[in-house]
Amino acid sequence: MKITIKTLLATFAVCLFSLQYVSAQRNIKTRPVHKTTAVGWVKLGTTHAKHTGDHDKINVPGPFDSYRKIKFKVKDAPVNMHRLVVNYEAGASQKVETRFTIPKNGESRVIDLVGGKRKLRSIEFWYDTKGILNGTADVTLYGLK
């Protein structure tokens, strides 16, 4: 009988340790993945494009991170982008001739920044909105590190 009790206790101990190992594996917490973090795009700022305006500037809040690509998303009305000026932290700027239309609730093409990763200070852009009946547009700037 002593052998069976030792065997029974050993089996019970193995089962107990196995159960703790399995339950520890289930308690691993993962961070929720948001669409913007999964893709890597970071929201840098938003402005309201009106019919009376033709030029706007989005200041990138500090500390100034390095980005290598930018894009725009538009809400509520289409926008014609004519020209961009990207201002960097070091004082340099990059002029980008653009002639594209961003549709209502759409986004622009991805714009590569010259020189790889650069610290952004602000983005100026010249635009016009398509038609008074379409309303005004919210223009949001995103950057990719």
Image: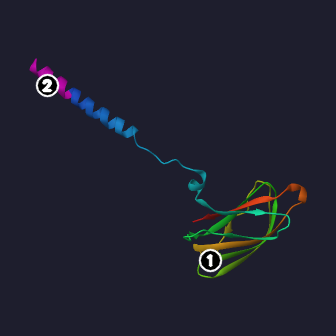
In this rendering, position of residue 27 left or right of residue 18: right
Q: Give residue 107's position: percent from left, percent from top.
A: 73, 58
The one nearer the camera, 2 or 135, is 135
Specify whether 97 is left or right of 143.
Answer: right
Question: Is 17 placed above or below 97 here?
Answer: above
Residue that numbered label 2 is attached to: 6
Q: Residues within 10 Å of mark 2 (few under 14, many from 20)?
A: few
Quarter of image, res 12 = top left
Dot 2 lies on which element?
helix
Q: Earlier in the sequence, mark 1 or mark 2?
A: 2
Instruction: Write the start and end of the magenta stretch as one range.
Output: 1-10
**Nearer to the camera, 136 or 93:** 136
Q: Mainly helix, strand or loop, the magenta region?
A: helix
Disc 1 marks a residue whose amino acid type is Tyr
Q: Amino acid at mark 2?
A: Lys
Q: Nearer the viewer, residue 136 or 95?
A: 136
User: Looking at the picture, how far across and down is residue 73, in whole percent?
Assistant: 72, 59
Query: Residue 18, percent across and down?
Result: 29, 33
Instruction: Give the residue drawn at x 60%, y 55%.
Output: 36
Spot occupied by residue 91 in the image (x, y as percentages of width and height): 62, 82
Q: Are marks 1 and 2 in contact (CB under 8 Å)?
A: no
Instruction: Please tell me which residue is depicted at 81% across the width and 62% down the height of the picture.
Output: 79
What residue did someone put label 1 on? 88
Height in image: 10 above or below 79?
A: above
Q: Who's the residue at 58% across and 59% down the image?
A: 40
| SS at mark 1 in the image | strand
Which of 61/120 is in front?
61
For discs 1 and 2, the disc positioned in front in the rendered view: 1
